[in-house]
Image: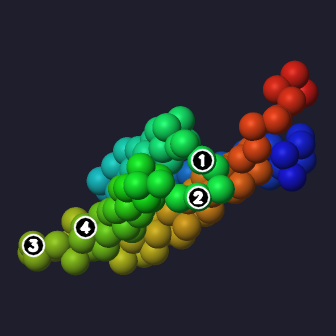
Amino acid sequence: MAGIKGLFALAFSGSVGMTLLVLGCALPQYNNWYPFFVIIFYLLSPIPTLISRRYRDDMATSSACHELALFFTTGIIISAFGLPIVLAEAPTAAPVILWGACGLVLAGNVVVFLTILGFFVAFDNDDVDYSMW
């Protein structure tokens, strides 16, 4: 899947996820841009894995650096799912966001994080021919 078709599939699924996120923020009945802060989690989530790949000694066995990176990545992903839920459950007079917006943001999270996972699976090997781009 590391070819052009895979790249198109990843681009399409990433744009679908971002569309769901923007819809959760911009629809007239929701119209609140606080859920858009999950973009920070989208940007932070691959960083620990990329760092641990750089410093992994042996590819066959697991290392403490890789396990710590997986722990941090999991925390970032859980935080991305927790933010819209906390915003919808906020103990104020009116919730910060409505549950419909929370659902759209959570659906966008699933699609975007599966896209990031698909990128790591598709482009995992080191012998990728970068001249095909």
Q: Earlier in the sequence, mark 2 or mark 4?
A: 2
> On residue 58, which mark appears?
1
Mark 2 touches mark 4? (CB < 8 Å): no
Give the Cα distance between marks 3 and 2. Answer: 49 Å
Mark 1 in CB contact with mark 2 (< 8 angstroms): yes
Q: Mark 1, residues whose alpha carbon is within 10 Å: few (<14), some, or many (≥20)?
A: few
The first of marks 3 and 2 along the sequence is 2
Residue on which the image places disc 4: 87
Q: Give, as a three-letter code, the residue at label 1.
A: Asp
Mark whose residue sits in front, 4 or 3: 4
Q: Secondary structure at mark 2?
A: loop
Using the image as rendered, state which of residue 119 and residue 127 is in the foreground.
127
Kindly report the distance in space between the C-alpha atoms of the residues bearing marks 4 and 3: 10 Å
The tag earlier along the polypeptide, 4 or 3, is 4
Real-space Cα distance between discs 1 and 4?
42 Å
Q: What residue would you read off at disc 3? A: 92
Residue 102: image location, x then y, percent: 39, 71
Q: Residue at x 82, y 26 (%)?
A: 130
Dot 4: element: helix
